[in-house]
Image: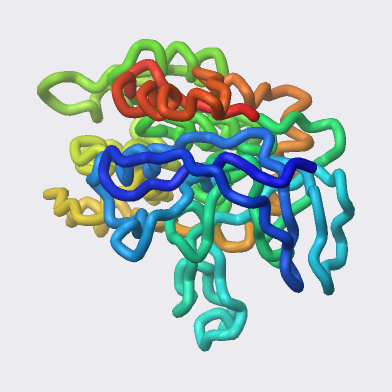
Amino acid sequence: MPRTQQVAFLHGPHDLRIEHLAIPDPGPGQVLVRVQAAGICGSDVECFEGESKEGRYDLAPYTPGHEWAGQVAALGDMVSGFAVGDKVTGDCVLKCFRCANCKQGLMPAACLNMREAGFRPDSPGAWGEYLVIEDSYLHRLPDDWTAEEGALVEPFGVGYYGIWGPGGWVDASDDVVIFGAGPIGLSALITCKTAGARVVVVDPLPNRLALATRLGADVTLTPPPAGELAPQIAQVCVAGRGPSLVVEASGNDGAVASVFDVAGFQCRVRLIGHTVGHKVPVEIGKTLWRGMSIYGQGGVSDFTPRTIRFMDRARRTADFTTLISHRVPFADLHGAVDIAVSHKAEAVKVMVVF
């Protein structure tokens, strides 16, 4: 194993630097992972652009990268369940297991000492050749998986948990409308199609709608520049009922407002797209008279093992790597980030490969 590695640090908006550092030894309860693939998320882009407070370079420069896969390179003391050479991925939201909220079994995002891998200097991400992480947050991948499939576990888990998190479900009786055909919306699409549901995907970008069709969408729609989307959706759902499940995965204000217009009676509404800080006018009274059930998802709750099992079975019929639009070597990390930042319409999932 080499003695030094290259690691990226985000110092501030548009200030991403590559540094040469010694490869650390894992401490007690820690695992050293050789990174093989790491995705670039929309949240990484917003942090790079200075449009999000999620990335904490106000504390110190940090290493991004919360969507990743690699192989175990070394084990610290008191680590069990892993061996050198294992294929692994890790959680993004890191709970402490000790605070009052963790002891109540609340989701990791409720942890009073929460860290986020790839967003803070005390929990480095995978935009580097090696990564040290506690074994509590590490998960084995099946031996026959590629590193790219493993790096898709985190983003796919967001869409999967968005459907199946507390109170959620989908089956072949459902008419589903998904707003947004980015990686999260497309993950929700795969989840719903695996269950046999009929799915309508709404997105303004033709290339993303084409990808949704390739992944099994029954109907794709471009939101009209003016006027309501509800009549179009009503035509393709069960007559007089509208969709039984609506998934908002775009984070777009207009899409959020449309959710309450298109949802059918007793519709389950799952809000996945990030809209923190947005105040969106909606006709909230429709939730009463239509009996909507609304759930917001943020910070997946211990779903990584279940996500891996689901993907391992669904990969027989669904090619998850279809979500990857660009593959860029780590040596050209700045180029990979530029694609994700400057070509958002074409970039579905940019994957950094090692």
Could you tell me which residue is drawn at 63 percent across and 62 percent down?
Answer: 302
Locate residue 341, reporting x and y percent. Answer: 32, 28
| In front of the other: 62 or 4 | 4
Residue 258 relative to residue 33: left or right: left
Q: Position of residue 173 (x, y in %)?
A: 57, 36
- Residue drawn at (57%, 76%), measured in percent from left and top? 96
* Rendered position, 140 above or below 102: above
Residue found at x 83% / y 73% = 78
Q: Quadrant of the N terminus?
A: top right
Q: Is residue 75 above or below residue 141?
A: below
Q: Name the quadrant containing residue 34.
A: top right
Total number of numbered labels? Answer: 0
Nearer-the-camera pick, 116 or 74:
74
Measured from the top left, where is residue 323 in percent x and y? Answer: 54, 24
* Quadrant where the C terminus is found in the figure: top right
Residue 32 visible in the shown view: yes
Q: Residue furthest bottom?
A: 100
Residue 90 in the image, given as x and y percentages of width and height: 65, 52
